[in-house]
Amino acid sequence: MQDATPAGRPSLILASTSIYRRQLLERLQMPFEVRSPKTDETLLPGEGPREAALRLALAKARAVADGTPGAVVIGSDQTATLDGRDTIGKPGTRERAREQLRQASGKVLTFHTALAVVRAELGFAKVEVIDTTVRFRRLSDAAIERYLTLEPAFDCAGSAKAEGLGIALMAGFESTDPTAIVGLPLIALTRLLDEAGLDVLGGPLE
């Protein structure tokens, strides 16, 4: 977390307890707070992964913004699909993570990273999603077991913790925003913060 907010600038809040999102936001060198959105992340019946990520990112931002209308609040969520069909969520257990990685071996996963920025006092609320296509290496069972021992990524969509050892699972990836795969697309965030009146490289916008 950064230093106190300078006078004349709206406060900035990250509606996430993820250490990786916090570390990414610190790159922008702006003061911010971290708060838990306490949002139910259960998917709705018939809801697609992209739609779920958009809904949850906005719900997280609004949950925190409701109590701090003068702040600019950031929410984010990430889901994944395998070969554009099956939804891949957070495994929760080693057994499910093992199965996810076996399914992903030699195939393509698309990570949908949704970003929301809300400033309630201005009625500002925007959300968008950045897609990252990841090509997985062919993974042996031994490699999968070693990975899960060293990096038990049971809370990561697709069991692939790109900010850690998960990068070794990948043959390559394509995205318009290289930080999206980690969970917070900074290029899109910088633009949305500017639109919300919080210029990353200057003072408040008119």
Image (cartoon, helix red, strand yellow):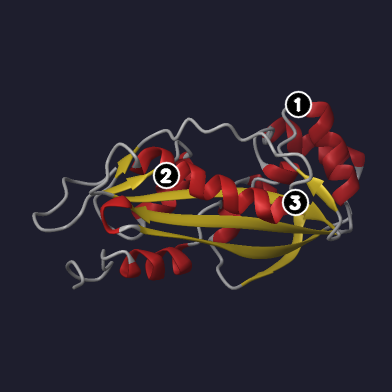
Q: Is residue 50 at all visible to an observer of this figure?
A: yes
Q: Is residue 62 left or right of residue 3?
A: right
Residue found at the very far front of the displayed protein: 123
- Closer to the chain start, of discs 3 and 2, is 3
Residue that appears at 88% across and 52% down = 105
Could you tell me how far apart the alpha carbons at marks 1 and 2 are, in whole angstroms? Answer: 30 Å
Q: Is residue 145 at all visible to an observer of this figure?
A: no
- The vertical placement of 77 against 201, above or below, is above
Locate the C terminus by quadrant. bottom left
- Closer to the chain start, of discs 1 and 2, is 2
Which residue is disc 1 drawn over?
93
The spot of residue 175 in percent (x, y) is 63, 70
Could you tell me how far apart the alpha carbons at marks 1 and 3 are, in whole angstroms? Answer: 23 Å
The spot of residue 178 in percent (x, y) is 56, 66
Instruction: Please give the label number shown on residue 62.
Output: 2
Locate the N terminus by quadrant. top left
Which residue is disc 3 drawn over?
48
Residue that appears at 58% across and 49% down = 55
Q: Is residue 42 left or right of residue 82?
A: left
- The vertical placement of 133 against 11, above or below, is below
Residue found at the very far left of the displayed protein: 7
Q: Is residue 55 left or right of residue 85?
A: left
Q: Amino acid at mark 2?
A: Arg
